[in-house]
Amino acid sequence: MNNPIGIIDSGVGGLSIASGFIKKFPLESFIYLADSTNCPYGEKSPEEIYKLTKIMVDYLLKRDIKLLVIACNTITVTCIDKLRKDYPSLLIVGIVPVIKTAVEQTKNKKIGIFSTSVTANSRYQNDLIEKYAKSCSVLNLGSSTLVSLIEKLDFEAIDGVLEKELIPFRDFNIDTLALGCSHFPLIKEKIQKYLPNVLILDSSQAVSNQVERILKHNNLVSTSANSGYNFHTTGNLKTMEYFVNKLTIKAKIERISPPANA
Ligand code: DGL
């Protein structure tokens, strides 16, 4: 089946997931929607996050997606259950940090999780820690400023924030860090600079594996050439273009007015 796979994120973070998909699924087409105008979602109420997410989902459903990937931890932990209830026939894959893999990889049993504040404090994430990381000491920290700075391409400020916010992980002596925000893999080299000997894990491999399972299980795997990659943003084209170039993705990029009117 050659309908596109839909990807949403509050901003450009989902590009870190999309680039992995493009390599793994060369025959699949993708449509990506970044709601950068309303980013960060983490500063909004759960009701508002749901409302904005629903607008994005409806926008992609009009474009006949066969599967929806929520490439945003904040949306996943806030409302994936409600989305599944309200869209019972839509296949939905969410994203959370790979805590189980971090536990398998750590040698000193000290792991870190670095997310947005809302994700770090969510019941959803704390339940995952409780379920998978009982055998380890866990430092679960959130940043409330990084996502906006990444959207603004303000790399100088990003360095300042990282220098400050990563110190606790160093002091805690973690050897493995799971990223709980899809924006963060976009600045992975910078994070690594402040935590030089730490294994940094993002969720892109886990989400790709999940998408592969679901496509196969539902007989939705594309067998003909893909029809391309359409990346839409409600925000600044420059930001989308910057990261698309950095990730060497060949996509058609478009700025759209807020999805409700598109
Ligand atoms: N990329 C989103 C995530 O993975 C950013 C969250 C936000 O907008 O607050 O959580």
Image: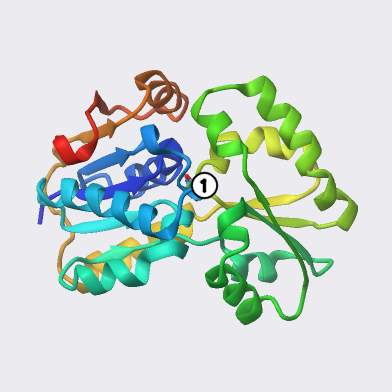
Image position of 62 (left or right of 26)? left
Which of these two is toward me, 190 or 10? 10
Can you say which quadrant of the picture contains the N terminus? bottom left
Q: Secondary structure at mark 1?
A: helix
The total of numbered circles placed on residues is 1
Q: Residue at x 75, y 80 (%)?
A: 135
Q: Residue at x 23, y 64 (%)?
A: 215
Q: Residue at x 32, y 47 (%)?
A: 8
Residue 57 coordinates in the image, percent (x, y): 23, 52
Q: Which quadrant of the view contains residue 128?
A: bottom right
Q: Residue at x 52, y 41 (%)?
A: 183
**Location of mark 1 (residue):** 43
Q: Which quadrant of the view contains residue 147?
A: top right
Can you say which quadrant of the picture contains the C terminus? top left
Residue 120, placed above or below residue 252: below
Residue 89, placed above or below residue 119: below
State whether label 1 is within 8 Å of ligand 1: yes
Q: Amino acid at mark 1?
A: Glu
